[in-house]
Structures are given as C-alpha cells and as structure tokens.
Image (tube, coloured by chain):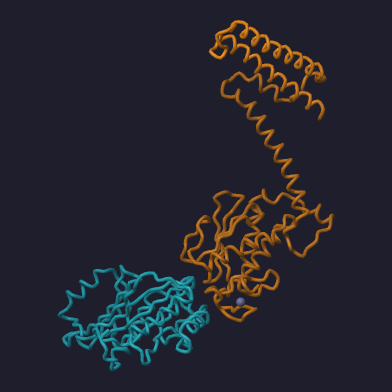
C-alpha cells in the first residue's frame, strides 16, 4: 500500500462517460495498461434519538482491500476509524434498530483501474444514489509509504496527466499527516471527504 | 619434460592402434566366411584378408616397440610422500581416498592455473574506475586474505558502518559465520539485504520495507529493481581487494544517498519523473541524483 492522492477532475461541459473516455485515452497514451475495474462505496448510518447525542457511522468498502470493511464513527468531537472483516456488514444489519441509514445517500465511485510503472491510477465515476455527481481520479505510488517524501513526485505525475486540473497542494486530510506512514484507512478518509461534498452538491442531474 | 610427454602420448596412441587392430583380427576369425566373400574362391579371399590384417598388426607392433624404445625411463621411484601410506590402507572405506586425493590435487592445480590467467587478464582490463593508487610498499602491508577473515573483524566493520549514519539501521543474521547477511534499512525509504563474503560485498538486493528479506527474489516495484541494478554497478565500482573495509564504507556512503530517492529531482533535467521512475542513479563521486537516461 503506497501513498494515494484522490482528486476531483472537473467535467466542465462533458458528460461523465465522455470525461472518463478522455482521461483513459490520456493515461493509455502514457503507457498504462488497464488492470480490471475498481469500486469504492459508502453507506452512512445515524443513531436513533434514544441513544442520546447523534452519532454517525460511515461504512465503506474498497475493492483494493476486498476482505475488509472500513467504518468511521463520528461522535461530533472526534472520528474513530475501524477496519474489520466482512462480518461487520451483518452486524450493521443487526443494529438497524439503533443505526438507520439515510435514504438516498449511498455513494460510490467506480470505473477502470490502470497500472503504469509503479503507479496505480483509477478513474472513478461518482454517483450518489445512482445520480451522477462527478469524476474522482485516484493515483497511488506504491513503493513509497510516507506522503511527505513523494508528494512532489505525485504532484508532477498528476499534473502531467491532468494538466492544470492537477492538485497544487496535498489533500486537506493528508496535510497534517504528511510525515506518517500511509495506510489504507487514509484512502478511505479521502473518499469520505469527497463523498460528503458530493452529497451536499446539487448534482448534475444526469443518470450515469 | 615437454618432449617426454609427447613421446609418452605417441606410445600410448600406438598401443591403442595395436589393440584396435588385434581386435579386428579376432573379429574376422570369429566371423569366418561371410556372404561378401562371394561364391568363387571364397577361402582364398578370406585367407588374403586375414593375412592383410595380420600384417597391419605386425606393423603396429613394431611401432609400439619403436615408440617404447624412445621413452626415457624415469630415474628411480616416484616419491609420493606420505600419500604412499594411503595405498597400504586396508580398511575398505578408505581405499577410495587415494583417488579423491589425486582428484583434488588436479583441481587445485587447475585453480592455480586459471586464477593466474584471470589475474593477468583482469590486471590489464581494469573495470575499476576508482581514483586511488597503491604504492607497492603499502600493498605489501595490507596484503591479507579478505574473503576468509576472523568473524570479529567483520563484526567490527558492521558496527562501524552502523554508527556511520543515524538513519541507516543494520540488523544482522549469520547463516554462515564468516559470511554475514545484513539488512540495512534506510530511513522509511527502502531496505537492502547485503551479503558479505568475508570483508567483500558479494550481493545486494533492494526492496520496499513491506517486502520479504530473502536474497533471491527481487522487489516487485520497478524503482527498487532499478536501484538494485545500480547497487550492483556501484558494488563493482567500489570493490577494492586491497582495502576491503574502505570499499564497504564507500559503498555505504553512496547507498546512503538514496535516503532522498523519492523526494529529490534529477540534477540534469530537474524533473522528478522520467519513464514513471524517480532518479534512480546516484553519481559515484558527487552522490547527486540522476535519471538513468540523464546521467
Ligand atoms: Zn533527469
């Protein structure tokens, strides 16, 4: 697991599939090979009023770690991450009387996955309850585990690939964790940040 | 000596010819009359054939006698030293020892010959580009075996390189005591397994921290495969049979410059990436980072 940067790519006037097409042509031209598909999804549950102050649990899956269920519990004052095996999904079903999922909030990002050198690139089409919301580009540099060491290198890669739309600063979530060892839960945090923004956005209204 | 050997060789050859021709006589005799002798006068034909063969044998015998007469008999018995006692060995298991002894003698003799040749060739085609010269007096002083050294000397060397850099951590294991394999981890960037032969570095493999420590599989990442390749080049470059500990220290100095493998841009083109790889080469003197294509 290497350092991963997640960034939004503006669709401007293009449709989602067209944008993915443009990006995949670009990455293939750079010498990338497609290695299957990927999927990251997120379901959000909130506690019922009987449990006191409201708490939120985000449950996420990442096809890169297929045997793991990630969950982030927001208590209002802090966020508690948890990585468990697949049984956690069943546990959440058992607790449906305490934690209910908000309707119309299931978010996911899915699309083609590419490998190029030691980089892994994923072009995700983001939908919130099946409504197209935008494009997320994930780039992982697998040999390096400390964000501070390879941020400049990743920035160069992203800008070479996304042009001016490439990020100029590390993702907000990573900014005060640049010296720490990167782990899969950090990618989950980045996805949740973007999903939360997409859920609040009015949406483009097209069905993907 | 050279002439003696030649004569012995030709004598052995003539014996070989004699034996093969005698065999042909017996073959002919045992087969008797054959179909290819035809019907008419077959007995005569057979006798002629036999006569011819016997003449050849006669000639060969004369050749053998001649070549044997040319040989100079060795002056007195060969002195085999204490190995003669081996031939008197009566226990069954030890009777094979003499053969083994001769074989290993031949083996060391060959090694001697080949290493002399290799030494000549290597001294004229030096692959070593280091900028040190050795005076002959110095050479005499430091001339020691450096692939077979006491383990405490190696131990000292390893502890001293461990102290050299704060961000290089060395762990050792010794499957074979005088030839340790060390794991040198360079900060949080990479780790290298380095195999020593005495005081000389014999093999280096560079990998990510999460990968296995074994010496035989290469890293799954392209960047570490390239760094491994370059470590091999540097290992040969710094190799110095006269001052092995200096060679190891210079190599470690060079290796340490990979602590900025991911963060340093290329000195020539100023970019981080070329062919999707960071600068994997380090200049051997200045330690500056370069892409392989930019060096
Ligand atoms: Zn360069």
- Farthest residue in the bottom direction? A202
At 73% from the left and 13% from the top, the residue drawn is B61
Q: Quadrant of the N terminus of chain A?
A: bottom left
* Residue B166 seen by the camera: no
Rendered view: B232 above or below A29:
above
What is the total number of numbered labels drawn onto the structure image? 0
Looking at the rendered image, the quarter that the C terminus of chain A falls into is bottom left
Residue A131 in which image quadrant: bottom left
Q: Chain B shown in which color? A: orange
Q: Report x, y in % for residue B119.
A: 75, 49
Is B14 on the left or on the right of A18, as rendered?
right
In this view, the residue in front, B25 or A160, is B25
Residue drawn 25% across and 81% down? A43
Which color is chain A depicted in? cyan
Percent of width and height locating residue A114: 41, 73
Above-or-below relation of A126 to B206: below
Residue A81 visible, this angle: yes
Dividing the image into four equal quarters, which quarter contains ligand 1? bottom right
Residue B275 x %, y %: 54, 73
Residue at x-position 47% and y-position 74%: A141
Q: Is residue B106 above or below residue A71?
A: above
Question: Horizontally, is B261 left or right of B131 in the view?
Answer: left
Question: Camera-side residue: B140 or A26?
Answer: A26
B150 left or right of A131 in image: right
């Amino acid at each position: 697991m290497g350092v991963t940067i997640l960034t939004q790519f503006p669709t401007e006037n293009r449709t989602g599939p067209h944008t993915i097409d443009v990006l995949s042509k670009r990455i293939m031209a750079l010498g990338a090979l497609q290695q299957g598909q990927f999927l990251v999804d997120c379901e959000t549950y909130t506690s019922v009023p009987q449990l006191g102050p409201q708490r939120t649990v985000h449950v996420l899956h990442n096809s890169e770690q297929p045997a793991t269920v990630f969950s982030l519990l927001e208590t209002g004052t802090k966020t508690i991450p948890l990585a468990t095996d697949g049984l956690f999904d069943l546990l959440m079903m058992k607790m449906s009387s305490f934690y209910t999922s908000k309707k119309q909030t299931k978010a996911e990002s899915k699309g083609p996955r590419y490998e190029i050198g030691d980089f892994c690139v994923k072009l995700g089409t983001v939908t919130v309850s099946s409504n197209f919301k935008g494009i997320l580009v994930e780039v992982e540099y697998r040999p390096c585990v400390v964000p501070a060491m390879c941020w400049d290198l990743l920035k160069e890669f992203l800008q070479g690939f996304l042009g001016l739309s490439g990020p100029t600063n590390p993702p907000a979530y990573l900014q005060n964790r640049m010296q720490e060892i990167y782990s899969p839960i950090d990618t989950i945090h980045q996805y949740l940040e973007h999903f939360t923004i997409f859920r609040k956005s009015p949406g483009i209204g097209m069905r993907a | 000596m050279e002439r003696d050997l030649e004569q012995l060789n030709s004598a052995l050859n003539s014996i070989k010819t004699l034996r093969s021709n005698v065999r042909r006589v017996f073959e002919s005799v045992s087969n008797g009359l054959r179909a290819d002798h035809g019907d008419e006068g077959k007995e005569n034909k057979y006798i002629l054939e036999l006569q011819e063969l016997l003449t050849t044998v006669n000639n060969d015998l004369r050749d053998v006698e001649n070549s044997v007469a040319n040989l100079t008999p060795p002056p007195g018995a060969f002195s085999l030293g204490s190995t003669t006692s081996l031939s008197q060995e009566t226990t069954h298991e030890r009777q094979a020892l003499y053969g083994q002894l001769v074989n290993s003698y031949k083996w060391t003799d060959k090694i001697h010959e080949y290493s002399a040749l290799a030494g000549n060739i290597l001294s004229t085609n030096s692959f070593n580009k280091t900028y040190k010269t050795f005076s002959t007096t110095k050479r005499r002083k430091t001339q020691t075996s450096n692939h077979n050294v006491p383990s405490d000397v190696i131990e000292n060397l390893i502890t001293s390189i461990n102290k050299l850099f704060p961000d290089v951590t060395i762990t050792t294991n010794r499957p074979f005591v005088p030839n340790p394999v060390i794991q040198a981890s360079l900060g949080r960037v990479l780790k290298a397994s380095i195999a020593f032969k005495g005081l000389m570095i014999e093999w280096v493999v560079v990998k990510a921290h999460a990968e296995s420590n074994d010496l035989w599989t290469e890293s799954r990442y392209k960047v570490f495969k390239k760094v491994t390749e370059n470590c091999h080049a540097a290992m040969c470059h710094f190799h110095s049979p006269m001052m092995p500990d200096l060679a190891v220290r210079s190599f470690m100095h060079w290796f340490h410059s990979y602590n900025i493998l991911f963060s340093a841009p290329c000195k020539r083109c100023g970019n981080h990436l070329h062919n999707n790889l960071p600068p994997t080469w380090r200049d051997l003197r200045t330690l500056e980072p370069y892409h392989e294509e930019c060096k």
